[in-house]
Amino acid sequence: MEIEKKYRVKQLPEQLDLYEKKIIEQGYLCTNPIVRIRRSNDDYILTYKSKFGIEEKQNQNACISNEVEVPLNQTGYEHLKTKVDDHIIAKTRYIIPLGNELKAELDIFHEQLDGLYFVEVEFPDEQLMNEFIPPKWFGEDVSGDVRFKNNYLATLENYQEEMFA
């Protein structure tokens, strides 16, 4: 099970180049349930996410879903990439340690989503999620806002014109 919260960013942390980063490209083959392909640096992954069996646990303050990841090779990824719906998302993800074994995943988007960035934190359980106090550089909690879901963002031609129109 995946338990995560998503936030806007008040200001980008300083010295981002000191943190681990991943160059990510991802697309969606289906959005209900979610079937996603992703290239993260040199890794290729097929992900299945669903809410099946956890609706009663759904929390408006977090995104909770069942998630299964399966490795792909580059050939399989490139084949599936031709079949994605809408747009491929391109972003740089910075992995920023927060303490308590938690990490912030700061996504800075490119191409049609250039200028958009937000941060996610994944939690091992709901108790730690409920006790979490965001760092000062985190902004508004947008976990329940569909406009910040990557499968929605993949449908946009230009986030500035369409997302906040």
Image (tube, rainbow, N blue to C red):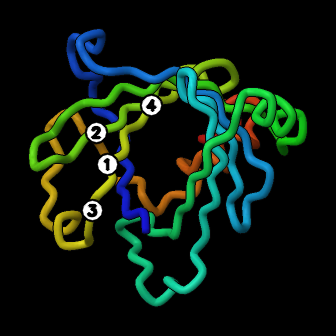
Q: Nearer the viewer, mark 2 or mark 3?
A: 3
For label 3, the residue is 124
For label 2, the residue is 104
Return the mark for residue 107.
4
Give yes or no for contact between labels 4 and 3 (Cβ–Cβ under 8 Å): no
Q: CA distance from mark 3 to mark 1?
A: 10 Å
Q: Earlier in the sequence, mark 1 or mark 4?
A: 4
- Residue plotted at (19% across, 68% down): 130
Q: CA distance from mark 2 to mark 1?
A: 5 Å
Residue 165 visible in the picture: no
Which quadrant holds the C terminus? top right
For label 1, the residue is 121
- Residue plotted at (44% across, 79% down): 58
- Front residue of 95 and 154: 95
Give yes or no for contact between labels 2 and 1 (Cβ–Cβ under 8 Å): yes
Q: Amino acid at mark 2?
A: Ala
SS label for mark 1: strand
